[in-house]
Image (tube, rainbow, N blue to C red):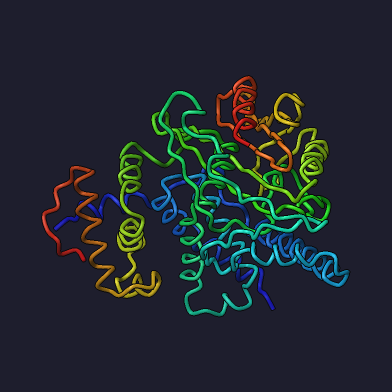
Amino acid sequence: MRDPEGFDTFYRATRQRLFDCLVALTGNHAEAQDVVHEAYTRAWQRWDRVGEYADPEAWVRTVARRVAVSRWRRGRAALTAYRRIGPARPVAGPDVESLTLLAALGKLPFKQREALVLYHLLELPVAQIAEETGVPEGTVKARLARGRRALAALLDADLAEESHV
Amino acid sequence: MSDPIGTALGGLRDQAPPEGFTPGPALRRRAQRRRTRRQVVTAGLAVLALAGGGTSWVANQAAHRVPDATGSAGPATSATPSVGPTGSAPAPHLDAEMFLTGTDLGAGRWEISQVTDDLGTDFWYWQDACRPYRRESYPALARRAEWNWRDFVRTDRDGVRLFQVIERYQPGAGPASLGEVRRRLTECGGVQGTDPVVGNLPYRWSVVAEHFAGDDALLAKHEVFPDSEPARVYYTVVVRVGDLVGTLALGDGETGAAARTLAARMAARL
C-alpha cells in the first residue's frame, strides 16, 4: 500500500538536494527541474517498494543521474524547458560565480563531474559514491583527483593540495 | 585548510528552480496518468496479438521497449524494418544523409548530437502538444517502422537549439501520419496550459501554412504566454516525402520564413 503522505514528506525533504545535484550535472536549471520531477514521478510509481529502502534518496538520485545522462532525454527535456521558459537568463539564484562554475563543470568528462558533485556538493563518502556509480573506490578517487585538477585549471583556482579525497 | 574546489561547489547549494517545484500531489497524478496510458497500450497490444493482425507491430514495439522505469538507460535497440501489410520488401533504414547538416542550417557553428538511447515506444513529437494524449487515437504510429533524431545546438550563440526527427512509416502510411499531426494540432488549438507536466504557462498551437514543400508539409506555430512578458513564438515544420516524415523544431527567434526554407532543404534530403 503506497503512502502518499510519506512520499510527499520525502519529496519535500530531499528535492532541493537533488535539484542542486542535477543543476551541477546538467548546467541547466530548467532541465534539472524536469529531471528531478521525472525521478520523483518514477519513485512514486514504485513507492511501495522504494519507500521501504534504507535510503530511498539514493535510489531517486541514481534514477535522476541516469535520466540526466541520457542525451536523448537531455535533448528533449532541454527543448521543452527552452520553449517553456525561454533561453537561459538571470534568475534568482545563480550568480556570476555559479554560472562560471557550471560552465567549467560542463567542460569536464561526465564521470569526473559526477564524482565531484556527489563528493563536494552532496558530501557523500567515497564508498557510497563507488556503490552508487558501480565502480571501485579507487576509480572514484582517481576521478575526483583528475576532476579537481581539471576544474582548478578551468577556474584558475589554486589547488594547494590533493588531500581532500 | 580551505578547499577552493569544495567551497566553490558548495556555493551551488540551495538554488531556486525556475518554476518552483511541482507539488507532490501533482507528481503523483502524473505518475497515475502514465500508468493508465501504459495499461491502455498493453491492452491494445493484447487485442492486436489476439486478432493476429498485429504480429509485426507487436514485435516492433518490443524492440522499442521503454527503458525500465528504475532509470536504466541501456543501449537502445533500433527498430527492425517492418514488412508492409502486403508483404512488400522492407524499406531501407534511415540514412544519416537524410538529416540536415550544419551547412543546411546556415551561419554559425553547430554541434550535432544523436544518441539512440531512451527513445521509448511511445515517443511522438506531438504527444506533449496538449493533454490528454492517447496513443490508440493515432493509428499511424502503429505503422511507424523506425525513427531517429538529431539535436542541433549552436555553440557560438548560447542557447539556440533545433531538433529534428525523421520517421519512416510502412508503405502507404506516410500520408495518414501527417493527417494525424493535423488532427492533433486541431484538437490542441485554442489556448492550453497550466498542466505542470507541460509547463505552467498558457500556450497555443496553430497551423499557419500547408503544402509548401515535399509531397506535403505544414508549418505549426507554438505561442507561449509568460506572465507580464510578450508572447514567445516558436515554429515547427513537418515535411512528408513518400512515407518519410521529417519534423524540425526551431529555436527562439527563428521565423516562419526560416522554417519554410529549412523545410525545402529537409524535403531535398528525404
Drawn side of residue B257 relative to residue A27, left or right: right
- At 25% from the left and 52% from the top, the residue drawn is B7
Disc count in the image?
0
In the depicted view, which residue is nearer to us: A96 or B206?
B206
Residue drawn at (57%, 75%) of the image:
A50
Please identify the quadrant where the C terminus of chain A is shown. bottom left
Q: Residue at x 57, y 66 (%)?
A: A9
Farthest residue, direction right: B51
Quick one: A93 or B148, which is closer to the camera?
B148
Q: Is residue B249 visible?
A: yes
Which residue is most to the top?
Answer: B257
Q: Quadrant of residue B158?
A: top left
Work out which residue is located at the far left of the displayed protein and give it: A160
* Image location of residue B119, percent across then percent down: 60, 56
State the residue in front, A11 or B213: B213
Q: Is residue B227 visible?
A: no
Q: Residue B4's x, y, as percent?
A: 20, 51
The quarter of the rendered structure image containing the N terminus of chain A is bottom right
Residue at the (75%, 64%) spot, across then down: B56
Q: Is residue A146 above or below residue B242?
A: below
Task: Provide residue B199's location: percent of width, then percent of height.
Answer: 64, 43
In this view, the residue farthest toward the front is: B89
Rendering coords of residue A36 (x, y %)? 53, 56
Q: In screen coordinates, is A154 left or right of B214?
A: left
Q: Does B96 sit above or below residue B72?
A: above
